[in-house]
Amino acid sequence: MRQHRQPWAELETPAVVVDLDVLDRNLRHTAELARQAGVKLRPHFKTHKSVWIAQEQMRNGACGITVAKLGEAEVLADAGIADFLVAFPIVGEAKLGRLARLMERANVIVSTDNVQVAQGLSDLGGSLGKVIKLYIDVNTGLNRCGKEPGEETAQLVQEIAKLPHVRVIGLMTHGGFAYGKKTPEQVREAARVEAEGLVRTKQLLAQSGIHIEEISVGSTPTSKYIADVEGVTEIRPGAYVFGDIAQLAIGVITPEECAMHVVATVVSTPRKGTVIVDAGSKTFSSDVSAHVPGYGTSRDFAGVYVEKLSEEHGNVHVPEGIEFEIGDQLVFLPNHCCTTTNLHNELQGVRENKVDRMIAVDARGKIR
C-alpha cells in the first residue's frame, strides 16, 4: 500500500527538526521536577550546544549550566551566561591557562577524581590568589571517571582537602548506566543507587570534619525520579530537552516528549524491502541502541528504520505492505540526540509543521 507523507514540504533535506512546543514543555517539566523536589537544576550543555536553548533553560530556573569542555563554557561566557560546572578533568598548562581566563568572567566549579589533577588546580589557584571550587567525581556504576563511593572516595577527598588553594564543595556522579536498564522501575532503582553512594560518602566525610555542600547527580533517566531519592541537592540532565530512542526505549519518556527528529527524502528505490534516503552517517549519529535495531526509527510507520549507513546514504528497512516513492519525506527518531546535534551547524525549530526559527549549534565541535 502506498504510504505518502510530506510533513515539511518546504524543508531541504536532510534536516534535523526540533518541535519547539515539545521543547518548551520538556524544559518546563524538568524545571518543575527540580522545584518540587527542592533541588537545583544545572542542565548539561553538551546535548544541544545552543546558546539560545541554554538561555531558555536559565529562564526556566536553572541555577547554571554544566559543560563537558572549556570550549563550551567559553561560548556561553561570550553570550553572558557565567555560572558553570566543568564536568571534566582539567589537565595541562594550556587548559589551566584557559580556565584562569574563564574564571575572570564567570563563577566556575571544576570536577576531578585525582590528587594530581587537583594539585594542578591548587597551583593555579595560588597563582591567581583564589580558591578553586571542586566537585569530586564518584563512580556509581558507569565505570568511567571516579573512585568507588564510600571509604575509597572519602580518602581521596581527605587528600585533596589538604591542598591550599582548592575547596571541595560537592560530590558528583553520572548515572549513565541507567540507559542499560529495561523498565522504569529499574531506572528508579538506579536513581536510588546513584544518590545513595554519594550520600553515604558525604556522611563518612562529615565524621572526619569535612562538610560537603552539594550532592550532584547526572543522567536524564534518573532525573525523572529525583522526588523519590533523598540527600541530592542538584541534578544535571542533558538529553531531556530533545528526547531520543535511548530514553523512549526504557520507558522514561513518551513519544509526545520527543522534540528532535531527522527528516530525510527517499532518493532511490533499488529493491524490494529497501529505500535509500539522503541521510547517512554525516546526518545520523552512528550510535546504536541495545533496545531497537538500526540508527533511526520511523516516527510514522511501524517496522521502518535506518538499517545501514554510508556517509551520505541511509538504507531504510521497509516491511511488507508499506511502499514509498522517490521524493517522499521520512521522519526518524535518532538513537542519540546529543551526538546527532554535534553533526550539524543548525537545527530547524518548527511549530505546527512550519519552520519558526533556526537554532544555531553554537558550540559544535568544541571538543577541547
Image (cartoon, rainbow, N blue to C red):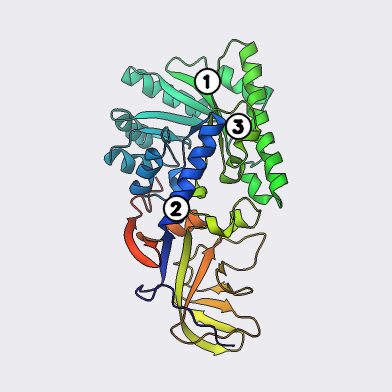
Question: In the image, which disc is placed on residue 79?
Answer: none
CA–CA distance in space, label 3 to label 2:
31 Å
Secondary-structure class at tag 1: loop
Secondary-structure class at tag 3: loop
Question: In the image, which disc is placed on residue 23?
Answer: 2
Quick one: 308 or 62, which is closer to the camera? 62
**Residue type at tag 1:** Glu
Residue 324, relative to residue 352: is it above or below? below
Residue 292, relative to residue 27: is it above or below? below
Question: In the image, which disc is placed on residue 213?
Answer: 1
CA–CA distance in space, label 1 to label 3:
15 Å
Residue 197 as seen in the image, left or right of residue 347: right
Name the residue: 43% across, 59% down: 19
Name the residue: 27% across, 40% down: 78
Name the residue: 50% across, 38% down: 32
Quadrant where the N terminus sits is: bottom right
Q: Nearer the viewer, mark 1 or mark 3?
A: 1
Secondary-structure class at tag 2: helix
Q: Earlier in the sequence, mark 1 or mark 3?
A: 3
Q: Quadrant of residue 224?
A: top right
Do we see residue 181 in this rendering? yes
**Residue type at tag 2:** Leu
Task: Single out the residue that lies furthest toward the front.
Answer: 352
Q: Quickly name the residue at label 3.
A: 138
Quick one: 246 or 251, which is closer to the camera? 251
Quick one: 245 or 101, which is closer to the camera? 245
Q: Quadrant of residue 124?
A: top left
